[in-house]
């Protein structure tokens, strides 16, 4: 008797019943029980079974880059610049380890989506009690709000640096980027992917230019890739290290990836799904390789431009912007830095919106109209940003950025543990269940995340 296929793989593209009825005038409408993840884009990109491997690579390319965006958002800039200027190349090892963990976890996320036809939020709703599902949903929404806060602040800082706009004005302007998201969503998923890849290339180009003129000491950078015990002993270093972890391994990206891999119309047979997993993992690993380059480049820039010149307290993005041109002796350096920051913030906006939609639909089976979903997430991000800027002043922006990344790190176990649990469940995954070795590695990763978070709390309460 052949194994039963997951509901979303029994047929080709989702039927009309997956959509919200057009007659519904209320902004929220109940989704049918069998609705696929992101129904408007589900299996919308065709995959030819007879295509060459390079064409298949290109056909599956895209979701990994949407995921990679979250690993190079403005929150990373604050933690990486602060870590580079204060501690030199030491924290490069944290960036490397964090990216390797991210590659592994995102591979599990893609595997879950392809094997089960469910995203992580849907899998949680179907597996746990309603009370637990609601708790996980709230935790994930906090993570998305923290990420959105970093995007808002990063874009606002970039607008101030480029055009001299007050930060509060920049924060409000960034709330209007919902129009960009809605325009792109209406033109198809491939357009969104192309837009994201273009902005990633822009960011990479800007930093390649900066690194060339910064002339880093590559031998010291190579040594920095090796972990040291000092990271665990130094509370300030550990705080930034966990901020890097939170800024690199994004909890909501695990929900996002398990959904958007289903935009490809791969076959329902075991062979087709296994092939889809192989190409999807290749896509995400390559994309996260670019994210590793950009994250490392930011920290190396902070170390080469500031730390080696005795400037150990350049933690503010605005300070880095002001100092880059005179320090590097290149007038265009600061402008490129700000342009890359703006591109990073706008890029993260797209994935934040998609992740929010996936999480709300998956956990609650409630689909909000895109404009309302964006309004809610943007409001949750703009309110604390305006309050901090108004009360504490503009010089506290980077501190808030770093704090938002630490908050993200504390949300990680609540996404990672269910992901590991589900991908190791034969009842859900069938022949695609994780091997024993994969499960051992997965639980080591989860334990490492829990350990670092607990250690940071202990050091904070001890007042070290």
Image (spheres, rainbow, N blue to C red):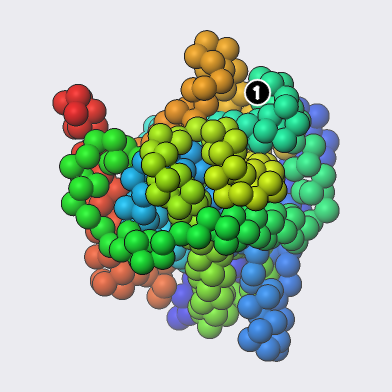
Counting the numbered discs, the total is 1
Residue 403, percent from left and from top: 42, 31
Q: Residue at x 40, y 34 (%)?
A: 313
Q: Can residue 384 be seen from the camera position used here? A: no
- Relative to 361, residue 164 above or below: above
Closer-to-camera residue (400/457) = 400
Q: Nearer the viewer, residue 95 or 166?
A: 166
Q: Nearer the viewer, residue 353 or 225?
A: 225
Q: Residue at x 58, y 58 (%)?
A: 213
Q: Is residue 178 left or right of residue 382?
A: right
Q: Residues within 10 Å of mark 1 (few under 14, many from 20)?
A: many
Quarter of the image with the C terminus is top left
Q: Residue at x 50, y 32 (%)?
A: 316
Look at mark 1 in the image and give the residue it sits on: 167
Q: Which of the 4 image quarters holds residue 430?
A: bottom left
Residue 309 position in % (x across, y down):
42, 45
Vertically, is 135 above or below 112? above
């Amino acid at each position: 008797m052949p194994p039963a296929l997951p509901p979303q793989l029994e047929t080709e593209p989702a039927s009309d019943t997956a959509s919200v009825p057009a007659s519904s005038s209320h902004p929220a409408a109940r989704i049918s029980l069998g609705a696929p993840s992101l129904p408007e884009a589900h299996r919308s990109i065709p995959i030819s079974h007879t295509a060459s491997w390079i064409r298949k690579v290109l056909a599956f390319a895209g979701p990994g880059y949407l995921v990679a965006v979250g690993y190079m958002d403005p929150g990373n800039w604050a933690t990486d610049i602060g870590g580079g200027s204060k501690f030199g190349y030491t924290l490069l090892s944290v960036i490397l380890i964090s990216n390797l963990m991210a590659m592994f976890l995102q591979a599990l996320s893609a595997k879950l989506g392809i094997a089960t036809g469910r995203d992580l939020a849907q899998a949680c709703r179907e597996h746990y009690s309603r009370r637990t599902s609601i708790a996980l949903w709230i935790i994930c929404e906090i993570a998305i709000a923290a990420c959105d806060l970093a995007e808002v602040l990063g874009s606002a800082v970039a607008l101030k640096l480029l055009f001299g706009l007050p930060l509060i004005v920049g924060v409000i302007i960034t709330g209007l980027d919902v129009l960009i998201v809605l325009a792109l969503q209406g033109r198809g998923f491939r357009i969104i992917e192309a837009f994201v890849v273009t902005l990633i290339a822009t960011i990479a180009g800007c930093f390649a230019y900066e690194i060339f003129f910064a002339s880093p000491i590559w031998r010291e950078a190579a040594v920095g890739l090796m972990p040291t015990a000092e990271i665990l002993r130094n509370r300030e270093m550990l705080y930034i290290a966990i901020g890097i972890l939170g800024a690199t391994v994004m909890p909501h990206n695990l929900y996002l990836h398990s959904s958007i891999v289903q935009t490809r119309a791969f076959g329902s047979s075991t062979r087709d799904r296994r092939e889809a997993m192989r190409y999807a993992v290749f896509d995400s690993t390559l994309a996260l390789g670019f994210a590793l380059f950009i994250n490392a480049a930011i920290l190396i820039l902070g170390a080469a431009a500031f730390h080696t010149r005795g400037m150990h307290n350049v933690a503010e993005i605005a300070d880095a912007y002001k100092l880059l041109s005179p320090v590097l002796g290149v007038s265009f350096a600061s402008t490129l830095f700000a342009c890359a920051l703006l591109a990073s913030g706008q890029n993260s906006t797209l994935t934040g919106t998609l992740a929010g939609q996936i999480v709300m639909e998956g956990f609650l089976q409630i689909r909000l109209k895109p404009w309302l979903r964006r309004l809610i997430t943007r409001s949750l991000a703009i309110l604390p940003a305006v309050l901090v800027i108004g009360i504490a002043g503009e010089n506290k922006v980077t501190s808030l950025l770093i704090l938002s990344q630490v908050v993200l790190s504390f949300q990680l176990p609540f996404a990672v543990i269910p992901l590991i649990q589900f991908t190791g469940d034969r009842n859900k995954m069938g022949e695609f269940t994780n091997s024993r070795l994969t499960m051992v590695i997965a639980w080591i990763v989860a334990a490492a995340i829990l350990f670092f978070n607990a250690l940071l709390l202990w050091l904070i309460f001890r007042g070290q």
